[in-house]
């Protein structure tokens, strides 16, 4: 069963090896997934039949409501001596689809500068909206940009990510946004319909990384129930091989492989998508 969408604006802090103690910021309408992609591995299930476009439907939190909620949580953490390492804009869909995304980023920056000047602000994005002028301006204001890029060829991109844009559009957008950290999910379908870990798929992806001017790369695999039930994680040995190819290009790469809990159940990967989109 897919995870239920979040109901509030602020969640966490989520603790992971990638982001430390990260306070999540959800910009999506409560209880409703909004995404312009349809990734087979999404822990929130398929996007079909759910609002997929910017501004479609109601329920978007206002920029003022987002800033107010984050301010209250930061102040609460300070009163309780609770550690927060960073603010991470993520949630249960694509955050840059928010019609006031640029205003929200500006408000969060001003809030951070006032309450916690050393705290970085990060975003987790599917990379499809980078060339939208207001989104691009907002992304350049953030301290960390963790951008999705799982494929370098159109067939793999369509099968795995189900987006309505082209992979070239995504790559061209990322090229304008340097520096970025690329987060890449590698999966295999037991029915052999999807596999972006093959030699050919990885070769296309490596070209895309170079073209997009990735500064760092996070390589990982599924560790929660995906939308497509036949998907399987890629073995750690293969993830390390892929990361090795990236490093030979001169790009730092880290591997976050699925672990196992006692009793044989899957454990959260050290740095895999923890909480909502982190």
Image (cartoon, rainbow, N blue to C red):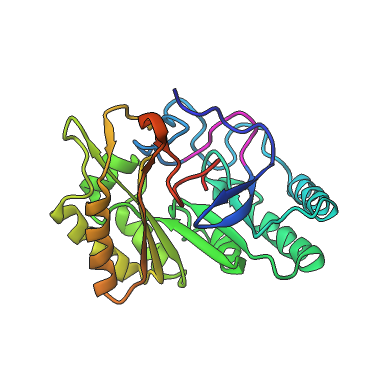
Residue at horizontal 64 percent and vertical 65 percent from the top: 120
Question: Is residue 224 shown to the viewer in this render?
Answer: no
* Residue 29 lies in the magenta-colored region: yes
Q: Position of residue 182 (x, y in %)?
A: 40, 61
Quarter of the N terminus within the rendering: top left
Displayed quadrant of residue 103: bottom right
- On screen, 276 above or below 246? above
Q: Is residue 249 left or right of residue 130?
A: left
- Please tell me how many numbered marks the rendered image carries: 0
Residue at horizontal 45 percent and vertical 58 percent from the top: 147
From the image, give the main secondary structure of the stretch colored magenta: loop
- On screen, 251 above or below 61? below
**Residue at the bottom extreme of this rendering:** 250
**Residue at the top extreme of this rendering:** 1
Question: Is residue 149 shown to the viewer in this render?
Answer: yes
Q: Which residues are magenta?
A: 28-35
Q: Position of residue 102 (x, y in %)?
A: 64, 58
* Residue 218 lies in the magenta-colored region: no
Q: Position of residue 198 (x, y in %)?
A: 16, 50
Displayed quadrant of residue 91: top right
Depth order, front residue of 83/32: 83
**Residue at the front extreme of this rendering:** 262
**Residue at the right extreme of this rendering:** 79
Residue at horizontal 14 percent and vertical 55 percent from the top: 199
Depth order, front residue of 95/264: 264
Residue at horizontal 44 percent and vertical 48 percent from the top: 272
Q: Position of residue 277 (x, y in %)?
A: 51, 45
Depth order, front residue of 31/254: 254
């Amino acid at each position: 069963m897919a995870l239920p969408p979040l109901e509030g604006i602020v969640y966490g802090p989520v603790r992971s090896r990638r982001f430390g103690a990260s306070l999540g910021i959800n910009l999506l309408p409560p209880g409703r997934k909004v995404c312009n992609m349809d990734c087979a591995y999404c822990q929130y299930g398929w996007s079909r039949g759910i609002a997929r476009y910017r501004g479609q439907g109601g329920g978007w939190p206002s920029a003022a409501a987002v800033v107010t909620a984050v301010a209250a949580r930061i102040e609460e953490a300070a009163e309780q001596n609770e550690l927060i390492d960073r603010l991470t804009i993520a949630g249960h869909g694509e955050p840059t689809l928010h019609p006031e995304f640029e205003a929200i980023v500006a408000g969060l920056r001003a809030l951070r500068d006032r309450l916690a000047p050393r705290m970085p602000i990060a975003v987790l994005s599917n990379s499809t909206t980078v060339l939208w002028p207001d989104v691009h301006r907002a992304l350049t204001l953030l301290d960390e940009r963790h951008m999705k890029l799982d494929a370098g060829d159109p067939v793999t991109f369509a099968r795995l990510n189900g987006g309505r844009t082209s992979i070239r559009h995504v790559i061209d957008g990322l090229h304008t946004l340097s520096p970025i950290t690329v987060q890449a999910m590698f999966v295999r379908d037991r029915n052999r319909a999807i596999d972006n870990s093959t030699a050919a798929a990885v070769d296309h992806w490596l070209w895309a990384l170079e073209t997009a001017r990735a500064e760092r790369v996070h390589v990982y695999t599924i560790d929660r129930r995906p939308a497509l039930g036949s998907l399987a994680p890629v073995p750690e040995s293969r993830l390390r091989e892929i990361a090795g190819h990236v490093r030979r290009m001169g790009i730092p790469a880290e591997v976050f492989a699925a672990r196992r809990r006692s009793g044989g159940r899957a454990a959260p990967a050290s740095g895999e998508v923890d909480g909502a989109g982190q």
